[in-house]
């Protein structure tokens, strides 16, 4: 009786050992699967954290710009206007051939230049046209301000371009500004084309020029150069945007930017 | 000389008992103690080594070593609970581990009286008839809980290089192989009549050897790996 019972038990014990051995193998496979998922989650969290940091950095930058622009407009601009008014009054007290009067005139002329410079800096700091009239008007103004007889810039966009969210519009404006400056001042291009289109759920911006081009890998590897391009990439990361370069030394450059219009809710706090 | 004779007469039992030396020697350098769990596990291997060596010596000298046999089970369970308690290292797990330790020791005492009605003759009896089954069941639950904990936070990059994975595998195979055989093993040992179930010895010694080899791998990994735990070991 005991022997029969033992035989059954031995069978059960053997099966139990086999089951546990199979269990260990299955567990290892399952663990690898879970670990892959875990690593993916960690990576996603890190990526989100990086995006949050980027957003915070750009938000801080824009806030600083607004504060500085406000200071320039309200304080410096007002004081310069008062000084100009006083100088004009002083200038009127001298005869036209009076040497002192000429020095006052020179000072007023320098002051006029300074006031213009302050206004220009102010405009660069905060694109008021963008805030008041939208992206296409702001880009028109940007194109006009960067166009020179040596660098002709054309801006192509549909006439019925619908307004985008403030976040994306500011982002696109800053990106276009950086890319145009690169084309005009670094690439020495004579013809530059800026394109803005909207396709399905994304907005696309392209900047193409016939300048001297550049070696993208070389630029991105060099920590002293390519800061602007890296900034553009960082900005786009914050709104899940994407940038593509089609460049080569001596063959001009084509830069394409794509930004999904339905950006995450959190990104609206960027700017 | 007697021990050589004993080894020649019972080669499987001798090899089974000495196989723990593999884990003991591999894990001997004290510098590899990088956490409390490793410390407890080393203590466990040291205890098994001492127990086995004393057991071999006393058996070969035909001395009564039932005291060691009876004492062994609660010590093993308590140390393993400390190991897994340290691995998971959460207040609730520690509380449950300590409660289980106390409950198991109480059950062991009850079993001691059940297995030996004539308690005055305790040195002639194996006094853990049911405690072995309970201990094996407890170890299986403990290992499965540990595996579950591992999958909750799978921070160990390579499971095969994680020492306590091998410890858990060794315990699981040993416990699964022994849990159903323990009562028969008990009867095989205490039965005075013509009742010899040698096959039990093969299985018991087989799972012990596998378990000890896996403990050896675990000890080796404690020398290779630095603090790669899902918790705080």
Image: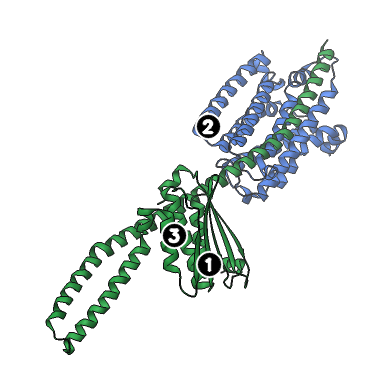
Chain colours: A green, B blue
Task: Tell me the mark number nearer the camera, choosing from 2 and 1.
Answer: 1
> Is disc 2 on the same chain as disc 3?
no
Disc number placed over residue B94 in the picture, else none = 2
Q: Which residue in the structure is indicated by mark 1?
A: A192
| Distance in Å between CA atoms under marks 3 and 1 | 14 Å
Neighbours of disc 1 within 10 Å: few (<14), some (14-19), many (20+): many
**The residue marked by circle 1 belongs to what chain?**
A
> Is disc 1 on the same chain as disc 3?
yes
Vertical placement of A121 versus B149: above or below?
Answer: below
| Distance in Å between CA atoms under marks 3 and 2 | 66 Å
Q: Which of B233 and B71 is in front in this view?
A: B233
Vertical placement of A1 versus B31: above or below?
Answer: above
**The residue marked by circle 2 belongs to what chain?**
B
**The residue marked by circle 3 belongs to what chain?**
A
Task: Tell me the mark number nearer the camera, choosing from 3 and 2.
Answer: 3
Disc number placed over residue A139 in the picture, else none = 3
């Amino acid at each position: 009786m005991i022997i029969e019972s033992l035989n059954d038990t031995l069978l059960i014990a053997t099966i139990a050992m086999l089951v546990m051995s199979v269990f260990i193998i299955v567990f290892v496979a399952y663990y690898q699967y879970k670990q892959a998922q875990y690593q993916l989650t960690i990576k996603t969290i890190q990526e989100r954290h990086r995006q949050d940091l980027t957003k915070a950095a750009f938000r801080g930058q824009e806030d600083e710009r607004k504060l500085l622009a406000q200071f320039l407009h309200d304080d410096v601009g007002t004081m310069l206007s008062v000084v100009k008014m006083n100088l004009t009054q002083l200038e009127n007290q001298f005869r036209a051939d009076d040497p002192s009067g000429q020095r006052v005139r020179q000072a007023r002329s320098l002051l006029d230049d300074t006031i213009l410079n302050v206004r220009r800096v102010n405009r660069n700091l905060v694109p008021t046209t963008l805030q008041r009239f939208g992206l296409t008007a702001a880009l028109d103004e940007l194109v006009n301000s960067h166009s020179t007889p040596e660098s002709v810039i054309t801006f192509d966009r549909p006439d019925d371009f619908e307004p985008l969210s403030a976040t994306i519009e500011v982002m696109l404006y800053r990106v276009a500004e950086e890319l145009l400056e690169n084309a005009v001042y670094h690439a020495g291009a004579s013809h530059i084309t800026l394109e803005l289109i909207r396709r399905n759920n994304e907005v696309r911006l392209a900047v193409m020029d016939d300048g001297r081009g550049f070696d993208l890998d070389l630029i991105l590897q060099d920590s002293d150069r390519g800061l602007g391009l890296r900034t553009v990439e960082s900005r786009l990361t914050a709104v899940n945007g994407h940038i593509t370069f089609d460049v080569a030394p001596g063959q001009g450059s084509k830069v394409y930017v794509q930004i999904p219009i339905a950006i995450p809710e959190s990104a609206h706090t960027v700017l | 000389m007697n021990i050589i004779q004993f080894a020649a007469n019972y080669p499987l039992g001798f090899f089974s008992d000495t196989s723990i030396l593999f884990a003991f020697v591999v894990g001997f350098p004290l510098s590899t103690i990088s956490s409390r769990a490793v410390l407890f596990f080393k203590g466990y291997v040291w205890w098994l080594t001492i127990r086995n060596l004393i057991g071999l010596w006393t058996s070969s000298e035909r001395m009564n070593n039932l005291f060691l046999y009876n004492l062994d089970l609660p010590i093993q369970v308590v140390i393993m609970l400390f190991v897994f308690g340290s691995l998971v290292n959460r207040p609730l797990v520690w509380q449950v581990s300590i409660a289980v330790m106390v409950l198991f020791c109480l059950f062991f005492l009850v079993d001691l009286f059940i297995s030996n009605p004539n308690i005055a003759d305790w040195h002639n009896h194996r006094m853990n008839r049911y405690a072995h089954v309970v201990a094996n069941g407890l170890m299986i639950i403990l290992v499965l809980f540990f595996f579950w904990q591992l999958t909750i936070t799978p921070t160990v990059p390579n499971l095969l290089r994680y020492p306590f994975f091998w410890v858990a595998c060794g315990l699981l195979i040993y416990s699964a192989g022994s849990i159903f055989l323990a009562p028969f093993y008990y009867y095989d040992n205490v039965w005075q009549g013509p009742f010899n179930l040698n096959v039990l010895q093969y299985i018991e010694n087989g799972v012990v050897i596998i378990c000890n080899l896996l403990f050896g791998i675990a000890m080796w990994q404690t020398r290779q790996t630095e603090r790669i735990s899902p918790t705080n070991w």
